[in-house]
């Protein structure tokens, strides 16, 4: 399943290169119009990131995200700066289908496990945005990709086994926005070690061949952002390839 991505800052659509807020591209498009276009093109879901929230540690684009969720015939998963259950329930009760928890999934797993029990596993996706270290291991970055964790991705995911966790989203930061292809080896290892989880891949898609490579390993979802914004291919082409 293709998840077209929308990154929001200051009420508009943007993209970052490798998560660098200084390497930001602004797109002169209306977020609600973009969401409606995705729905018309055949997408069942879209992925929205509140980058202001991710950077500042407090959800800042929730009103706009709720407006998008209620204006387009498409399911919405969203994250960025979600820090408490009240914020999460406001989004879920307001029309968002699934929230994405990033930094806290790494830094406060007990709280996130409590949320999983409270709102149910279908309503929460863990987002692990990872960098590969000199030792070859992948470790999550937190706080809008500005801080590194000492835990490996395998430590973090393994700690959630038995918690009811159902869906994970993994981004290779080194490939994000580069359009050089997804990290197939990493995703295959995740699928092998955690076969009970639904994996959404993110980062690196730049061509239809990249989409085909990811579809070949059959993840639950594939997030595509920059390639769609910049016209490398169309959403219907990605869905049908």
Image (cartoon, grey):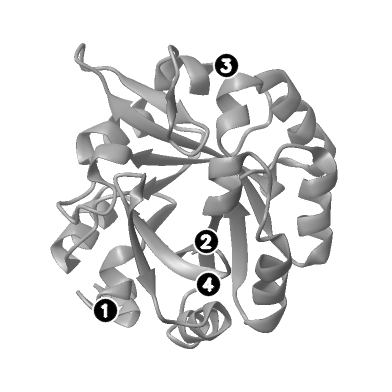
Q: Mark 1 packing: few (<14 Cα in 10 Å), some, or many (20+)?
A: few
Precedes in sequence: disc 1 or disc 4: 4
Q: Nearer the viewer, mark 2 or mark 4?
A: 2
Which residue is the site of mark 2? Answer: 9
Between the residue at mark 4 and the residue at mark 3, the CA separation in whole angstroms equals 30 Å
Precedes in sequence: disc 2 or disc 4: 2
Precedes in sequence: disc 4 or disc 3: 4
- Answer with left or right where residue 188 lies relative to residue 52: left
Between 80 and 166, the residue placed more toward the observer is 80
Which residue is the site of mark 1? Answer: 237
Precedes in sequence: disc 3 or disc 2: 2
Between the residue at mark 2 and the residue at mark 4, the CA separation in whole angstroms equals 24 Å
Residue drawn at the location 20% of the way across and 52% of the way down: 178
Q: Mark 2 packing: few (<14 Cα in 10 Å), some, or many (20+)?
A: some
Between 156 and 17, the residue placed more toward the observer is 17
Say which element carries label 3.
helix
Residue drawn at the location 39% of the way across and 57% of the way down: 223
Are dots 1 and 4 in contact, CB under 8 Å?
no
Q: Nearer the viewer, mark 2 or mark 1?
A: 2
Which residue is the site of mark 4? Answer: 44
Residue drawn at the location 71% of the way across and 75% of the way down: 67
Say which element carries label 1.
helix
Between the residue at mark 1 and the residue at mark 4, the CA separation in whole angstroms equals 15 Å
Between 87 and 92, the residue placed more toward the observer is 87
Which residue is the site of mark 3? Answer: 159
Which quadrant, please, contains the N terminus?
Answer: bottom left
Are dots 3 and 1 in contact, CB under 8 Å?
no
Q: Nearer the viewer, mark 3 or mark 2?
A: 2
């Amino acid at each position: 399943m293709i998840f077209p991505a929308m990154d929001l800052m200051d009420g508009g659509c943007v993209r970052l290169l490798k998560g660098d807020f200084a390497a930001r591209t602004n797109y002169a498009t209306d977020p609600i119009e973009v969401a409606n276009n995705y729905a018309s093109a055949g997408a069942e879901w879209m992925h929205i990131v509140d980058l202001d929230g991710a950077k500042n540690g407090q959800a800042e684009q929730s009103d706009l995200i709720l407006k998008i969720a209620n204006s387009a015939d498409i399911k919405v998963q969203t994250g960025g700066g979600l820090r408490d259950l009240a914020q999460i329930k406001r989004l879920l009760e307001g029309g968002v289908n699934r929230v994405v928890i990033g930094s806290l999934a790494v830094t406060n797993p007990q709280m996130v496990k409590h949320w999983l029990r409270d709102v149910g596993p279908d309503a929460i996706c863990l987002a692990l945005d990872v960098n590969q270290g000199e030792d070859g291991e992948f470790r999550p970055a937190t706080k809008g990709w500005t801080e590194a964790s000492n835990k490996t991705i395998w430590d973090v995911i393994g700690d959630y086994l038995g918690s009811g966790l159902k869906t994970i989203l993994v981004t290779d930061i080194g490939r994000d926005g580069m359009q050089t292809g997804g990290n197939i080896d990493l995703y295959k290892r995740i699928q092998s070690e955690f076969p009970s989880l639904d994996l959404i891949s993110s980062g690196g898609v730049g061509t239809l061949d990249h989409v085909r490579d990811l579809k070949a390993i059959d993840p639950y979802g594939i997030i595509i952002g920059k390639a769609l914004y910049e016209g490398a291919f169309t959403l219907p082409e990605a869905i049908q390839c």
